[in-house]
Amino acid sequence: MSTSSPPHRAIPGRKDPAWKYTEPFPRQKKGEAKCKFCKTIFHGGINRLKYHLAGIRGHDAEPCTKALPEAIRECQVLLETFETRKEIKKRQREELAQASIGCVGEASSMPSYCPSGSASASVAGSVSASGSINATPTIGPRVRKSRMDSYFEPCTTSGAQPSLESMAWNKEVHNKAKAAIGRFWFYCNIPFFAARSPYWQSMVDAIAICGAGFKAPSDSEISGPILIESVADVKATLEEHREIWKKKGCTIMTDGWIDRRNQTLLNFLVFSAGD
């Protein structure tokens, strides 16, 4: 008379299917697992238990002699999937690292960034009849040169990019990078026209020069020191223009219209021949 073992159930809150082959024990810490068959306790995560149940030696785990056949087969499949994903991630990191090295090229020192076009700035804003001020970001060809621009050379400018023979050019890596940008774009619901911003490509160039391993700033960094630095940069540039206005003179221009709520909006601009 054969007896069937009760069905195994995964532990709530733990997504890996292999946790169903464990059982709790006193003073169990995070990452520790106890084999349900031979009662061996493993430290350092669930993967060590999977090697144990799959019958694979090494990884500080001896094969389990009491594991059921279905547990052995499932852990073997889970480990095969895990190793495949790990190899894919490793290959992607190597490809991205080579792509970033190719973008920087063989230059021994970082060149200066000299953006083309005018570096003059215009100050614009909207003032409603109630007195509130609405900042109106403008996307256009006139870009204010920032102090940070001197640190980065855009990889898309002529001469900044090495020849195809001297770089590990991989179209698949570029497509994956664009797909990652698209996922961020769609998740945050960013308007498509934001890609026409004159600061968009310079941001990508700066990230590419930093190379693999660059950690994106957190929300606290963006709303804290980065924002403070940007405000200080704008104020410093504005002071430079005010000095020019004192010497060359300036003209204050205004334009007004009524929005859908019948509020009067006024847009003020400062024009100077010295800018």
Image (cartoon, grey):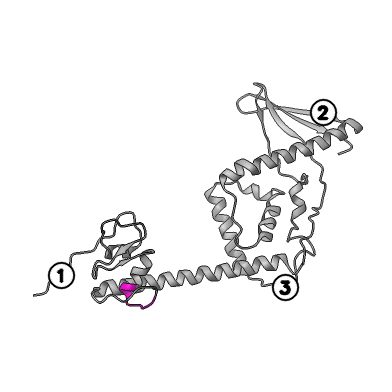
Segment tinted magenta in the rendering = 52-58
Reading the chain from its start, which is encountered first: label 1 or label 2? 1
Q: Is residue 249 visible?
A: no
Which of the labelled discs sits on residue 181, or is there none?
Answer: none
Q: What residue is at 36 percent from the left and 64 percent from the top?
A: 43
Where residue 107 appears, x then y in whole percent?
77, 67
Where residue 29 appears, x then y in whole percent?
34, 57
Which of the labelled discs sits on residue 252, or is there none?
Answer: 2
Q: Indicate the quadrant where residue 5 lies.
A: bottom left
Looking at this view, name the residue that lies furthest to the top. 130
Q: In which quarter of the image is the C terminus?
A: top right
Q: How many marks on residues? A: 3
Q: According to the image, label 1 marks what residue?
A: 4
Mark 1, secondary structure of its residue: loop
Where residue 169 appears, x then y in whole percent?
66, 71
Q: How far apart are marks 3 and 1 (CA)?
A: 64 Å
Q: According to the image, label 3 marks what residue?
A: 164
Reading the chain from its start, which is encountered first: label 2 or label 3? 3
Q: What residue is at 78 percent from the left and 46 percent from the top?
A: 145
